[in-house]
Amino acid sequence: MNLPNKLTLLRIILILPFLLVLYLDVPYASIIALVIFIVASLTDMLDGKIARKYNLITDFGKFADPLADKMLVMAAMVWFVDKGQMAGWALLIVLVREFAVSGLRMVASDKGRVIAAGWSGKVKTASTMVCIVLMFLPIPEILNTVCVAVIVVTTIYSGVEYFVKNKDCLSDM
C-alpha cells in the first residue's frame, strides 16, 4: 500500500477518535476534535499532492479518497446537528447532493466516462472544511449561521453544476 493510500486510511481511522472525543465529552473536547479534524483534513491535501507528484494514483485511492472526505465532513456535520449548531435540513441537502453526484458518476462510469471534480466542487469542499473549522471555534451565532449558509449554497451550486455539465450522461432517461 502506497503512502497516499495510507494517508487516506489514516483520515478514515481518525474519524473514530474525532467522534469519541466529542461524544464522550472529554475535557477540551471541541479543541481536541478540531485538531483531529484539521490533521485529517490536511491528510486529504497531502495524499492528493503525493499521489499526483509521484504518479501513485490507484483505483483504491480514487474510490477511498472522496469517500474518506465525505465520511469526515458528515461526522462533523452530524455533531453540529446534534448540538443544534446546524439544522437537520442543511445536513440533508449535503447528503442528497453527495448521493446524487455519486450516482451521476456511477452512470457516467457505466458509459465509459469519468467525471472529475470540478472547480465548484473543489470550492465547496474547501469552503466546507473552513466553515467546519470555524464552527468548532467560539464564534458568534451569526457567523455560525453564515458558515451553514456557505455550506448549503456551495453544495447546491456545485451539485447543480455537475448535473448541468453532465446532463448528456442522463440522456436516455
Image (cartoon, rainbow, N blue to C red):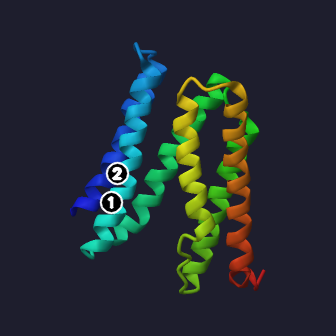
Residue located beneath label 1 in the image: 47
Identify the amino acid type marked 2. Thr
Residue 98, image x and y in percent? Answer: 62, 57
Could you tell me which residue is drawn at 73 percent across and 43 percent down?
Answer: 149
Residue located beneath label 2 in the image: 43
Could you tell me which residue is drawn at 44 percent across and 20 percent down?
Answer: 29
Residue 42, image x and y in percent? Answer: 37, 49
> Which one is nearer the viewer's eye here, 78 or 38?
38
Instruction: Tell me, yes or no, whether the two marked residues, 1 and 2, touch with CB atoms within 8 Å.
Output: yes
Residue count near mark 1 (Cα–Cα under 10 Å), binned few <14, some 14–19, many ≥20: many
Which numbered disc covers residue 32?
Answer: none
> Which one is nearer the viewer's eye here, 63 or 134?
134
Residue 93 visible in the displayed image: yes
Q: Secondary structure at mark 1?
A: helix
> Which one is nearer the viewer's eye here, 22 or 119?
119
Residue 131, image x and y in percent? Answer: 58, 41
Q: Secondary structure at mark 2?
A: helix
> In the image as oriented, which residue stretches furthest toward the top?
27
Could you tell me which residue is drawn at 34 percent across and 42 percent down?
Answer: 13
Please state if 59 lies on the left or on the right of 67 as rendered. Answer: left
| Quadrant of res 156 | bottom right
Residue count near mark 2 (Cα–Cα under 10 Å), binned few <14, some 14–19, many ≥20: many
Identify the amino acid type marked 1. Asp
